[in-house]
Image (tube, rainbow, N blue to C red):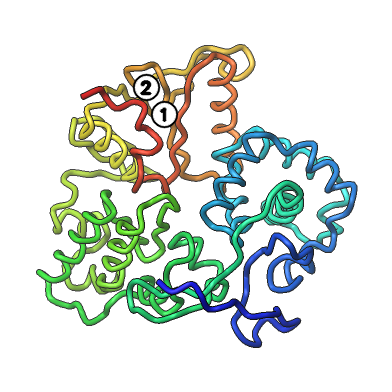
Amino acid sequence: MVDSDPAPATRTSNPWEGPTDWGFHAEEPQGALNGGVSHWCYWWNDDLKHRFTEAWGQDADELADELADSYAYMWPWFLGDLLSSRSPETAALVRSLLAADEALLERTQQTNSETVFTMSVIWGAFETVRERRTWEAPRWRDCPICGERFYGGDPPIWTYRQFGPSRYCTSCCFKARSGDDSVRRKGDVIDALTRLSSACDTIPPQAFAFLRLPLDLSPERRDAIMRGLIGMPPQERVKKVLRAPDWLAVLQTAGLVDSTWRPSRGTWCRAKDGHRCRSLLEKSIDDWLTAHGIEHECEPYWPKDEELNPNGRQRADWRLKSGAFVECAGMLEEADYRQRFERKVELAKRHGIKLYVLAPSDLMNLGKHLGAELPLA
């Protein structure tokens, strides 16, 4: 990889002239797109900044540092997605301060409070974190898939969000999302599914074209998944070739799952150890625990709590031999789900229970999150 070429000397007022730059530069007060993001946050005033700084906790600081070390100039774009699961206390405080400002939605001309939350986190964290540290600026790179050179700040946000830290050119990212429609033989389709499943180390979801790669995967693993995605035919082509009415039938035809059934919501199925799972996400985690010799109990009760669990009926997803609880955080974008999740986080804190929170994007690197639970060799 050649890194010697300089980045563009200046970022023009028109971001579409020359290489696009979607990054937040530590030394530039205007933020991404040469101030474009600041136009989205014209309502961000000194009072909000002060309250945001007060709500910003150490756990959020650590998350921001982790993202800045990996995503560099793109890190603020990802904080809104992760703050609720990785730093729930700070997320709750930020939501509270925004809710307390009755005129905020009117000022922002937004009706969606989650949009305001996300933009507040992006802009507030950028300003707050920049006061104590810097991060890498964009540079020229060689795409490991096609070999073409590209400017690191040029690929749009969705490519970083989906495929991780700057590594792939925009063209290869589009190919990974659109797939290869020339793959049309049944055996070839099954082979493509099997290769993708092996590269991901999990069951390919129906929306595999939008699969997000964890930022902490090794470069070699990320490259293997990218090649697997590029070699996959589109979802509808897979169903047509395998003559499958739905994705469950696709996975069964490819031999990736066995018996399954559908409740009113989700997909209930059996893990390899016989445990009943309420989704393919849960099955993937349960199978990983089994494969790595981690003893686990499904759906244990949370401790009774007069405020948070008065009837003692709330359940976790798993309890491990160590006593730690594990929760899937698959639908934090839904307000009711997020509130129940936040109660469980508080339950764990009050009762001294170690809690592992796993999001769908963690599936491909469970060893990092649950490594402390692996039995000693």
Q: Is disc 2 placed on a helix, strand or loop?
A: strand
Residue drawn 35% across and 79% down? 147
- Relative to the observer, which residue lies in front, 176 or 267? 176
Q: Residue furthest front?
A: 4
Question: Which of the 4 image quadrants contains residue 191?
Answer: bottom left
Residue flagged by tag 1: what amino acid is it?
A: Val
Viewed as shown, does residue 115 lie left or right of 75?
A: right
- Relative to the observer, which residue lies in front, 312 or 160? 160
On the question of residue 117 being in view, the answer is no
Name the residue that disc number 2 marks: 319
* Above or below for 353 versus 273: above
Q: Position of residue 248 (x, y in %)?
A: 24, 54
Of mark 2 and mark 1, the one earlier in the sequence is 2
- Relative to the observer, which residue lies in front, 140 or 270? 140
* Above or below for 41 versus 271: below
Q: Position of residue 71 (x, y in %)?
A: 54, 57
* Labelled pair 2, 1 in contact (Cβ < 8 Å): yes
Q: Position of residue 211 (x, y in %)?
A: 39, 59
The disc label shown at residue 326, or none? 1
On the question of residue 111 being in view, the answer is yes
Q: Position of residue 96 (x, y in %)?
A: 76, 38
